[in-house]
Image: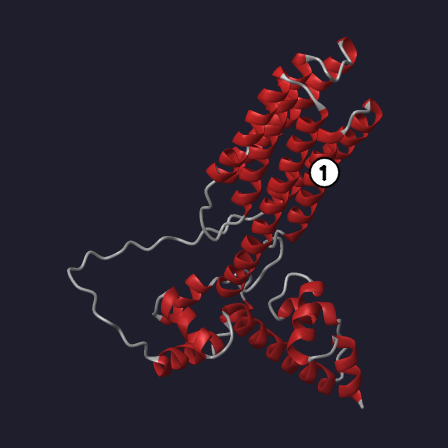
C-alpha cells in the first residue's frame, strides 16, 4: 500500500539520520566538516521527499504525485554543492531561505489539498471519525519549522533539542498512520462506447428510492455507510446520487446526519413521553454515531444549539 511504503521510507530515513547524527556527535562534532555537510544535505533531501510522500499519501481522494517535491529540492542540492566548494555565510543563509520557501509553498498546497480532501469525505462518507487529517498536517507544519531550525542551527544543544522533539512528533505521525482507515472507493470500469449519450438524471426516482430503501429501512443508522454502498442499495450509481445531493444544496454527509438527528429527536421524544430513564450517549449510539462528541457536533450544526440546550428548551 502506498501510504505504508512512504511511511516506512520516512521512518527508515529518520532513523538513519538520528543514528549518523549520534555517531557524528560522538566522534566528530565539527559542524563545518565536509562529511557533516554531505550527510546534512542528504538528510534534508531524503527527509523532505519521504515526508512529503507520506503526507500526500494520507489524502486518499486521489493519487497525488510526489515528484514535484523531489524537483523542488534540486536547487537546494546545487546550492549545497557550491557551498561545499566555496563555503560562506551568504550561501548558507540562501540555502536556508530556499528551504523555508519550499516549506511554505508545500504547506500552502497541503492546506488547499486538505480542503479538497475534506469535501471529498463529506461527499462520500457519513462517519468521519479517524478519517480527517488536520492533526497530522498541524504536526507536519511543526516538523517543517523544526526542519528549518535544524538547517539554521549552529549549536549542538539546539540540535539535540530539535532531534528529541522530532522523535516525539515522528512517533505521533506513525501512530496516526496506523489508525487511519483505508478509504479508496472502488473504481468503476469505463464502458467502451463509440459515442457518449447524454443521460438525464431522474431526480424524482432517486428521491423515491431514497425514501423507500434508505429512510424507511433506516439503513442510515449503519456505521460507516458510504455513498457507494447507499447507491447500490437504491439501484443507482455514486455519480448520480452525488449529483442529486448537490442539486438539493447538500452533500452526502449532511443528508445522513440529518436523518440520524431526526431519528434521535424522535427516539428522545418517545422515551421522555414514556417516562423511561435514558442516557443521551446511548441514544446517540442508537442513532448511528460511534461517539458522543461526533453526535454533539452534528446536532449543533443541524439544530443551531447544543444537545443540552435543546433538551432544556424541549422540557419547558
Q: Residue at x 56, y 55 (%)?
A: 112
Quadrant where the image shows the C terminus:
bottom right
Q: Residues within 10 Å of mark 1 (few under 14, many from 20)?
A: some
Q: How is the image coloured?
A: secondary structure
Is residue 158 shown above or below 28? Answer: below
Give SS at disc 1: helix
Is residue 71 shown above or below 232? Answer: above
Is residue 115 shown above or below 296? Answer: above
Position of residue 31 measured from the top left corner of the image (x, y, whole percent): 75, 17
Among all residues in the image, which is located at the extreme bottom? Answer: 316
Is residue 309 shown above or below 60? Answer: below
For this view, does 239 lie left or right of residue 250? left
Q: Residue at x 66, y 27 (%)?
A: 91
Viewer-proximal residue among 252 and 41:
41
Position of residue 220 measured from the top left corner of the image (x, y, whole percent): 52, 70
Position of residue 236 measured from the top left corner of the image (x, y, whole percent): 34, 69
Q: Is residue 56 visible?
A: yes
Number of numbered labels in the structure image: 1
Among all residues in the image, which is located at the extreme top? Answer: 27
Q: Is residue 1 visible?
A: no
Q: Residue at x 50, y 63 (%)?
A: 225
Q: Which residue is disc 1 drawn over?
A: 169
For this view, does 63 lie left or right of residue 154? left
Amino acid at each position: 500500500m502506498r501510504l505504508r511504503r512512504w511511511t516506512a521510507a520516512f521512518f527508515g530515513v529518520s532513523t538513519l539520520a538520528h543514528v549518523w547524527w549520534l555517531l557524528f556527535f560522538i566522534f566528530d562534532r565539527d559542524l563545518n566538516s565536509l562529511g557533516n555537510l554531505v550527510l546534512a544535505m542528504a538528510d534534508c533531501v531524503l527527509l523532505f521527499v519521504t515526508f512529503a510522500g507520506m503526507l500526500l499519501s494520507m489524502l486518499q481522494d486521489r493519487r497525488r504525485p510526489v515528484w514535484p517535491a523531489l524537483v523542488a529540492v534540486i536547487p537546494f542540492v546545487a546550492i549545497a554543492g557550491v557551498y561545499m566548494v566555496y563555503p560562506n555565510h551568504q550561501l548558507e543563509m540562501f540555502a536556508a531561505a530556499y528551504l523555508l520557501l519550499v516549506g511554505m509553498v508545500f504547506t500552502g498546497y497541503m492546506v488547499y489539498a486538505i480542503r479538497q480532501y475534506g469535501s471529498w469525505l463529506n461527499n462520500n462518507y457519513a462517519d468521519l471519525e479517524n478519517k480527517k487529517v488536520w492533526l497530522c498536517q498541524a504536526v507536519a507544519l511543526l516538523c517543517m519549522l523544526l526542519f528549518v531550525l535544524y538547517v539554521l542551527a549552529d549549536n549542538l544543544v539546539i540540535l539535540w533539542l530539535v532531534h528529541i522533539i522530532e522523535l516525539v512528533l515522528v512517533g505521533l505521525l506513525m501512530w496516526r498512520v496506523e489508525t487511519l482507515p483505508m478509504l479508496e472507493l472502488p473504481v468503476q470500469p469505463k464502458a467502451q462506447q463509440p459515442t457518449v449519450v447524454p443521460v438525464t438524471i431522474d431526480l424524482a426516482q432517486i428521491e423515491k428510492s431514497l425514501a423507500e430503501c434508505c429512510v424507511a429501512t433506516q439503513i442510515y443508522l449503519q456505521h460507516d455507510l458510504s455513498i457507494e454502498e447507499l447507491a447500490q442499495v437504491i439501484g443507482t450509481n455514486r455519480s448520480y446520487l452525488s449529483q442529486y445531493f448537490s442539486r438539493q444544496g447538500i452533500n452526502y454527509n449532511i443528508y445522513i446526519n440529518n436523518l440520524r438527528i431526526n431519528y434521535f429527536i424522535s427516539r428522545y421524544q418517545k422515551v421522555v413521553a414514556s417516562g423511561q430513564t435514558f442516557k443521551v450517549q446511548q441514544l446517540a449510539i442508537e442513532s448511528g454515531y460511534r461517539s458522543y462528541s461526533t453526535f454533539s457536533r452534528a446536532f449543533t450544526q443541524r439544530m443551531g444549539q447544543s444537545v443540552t440546550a435543546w433538551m432544556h428548551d424541549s422540557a419547558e
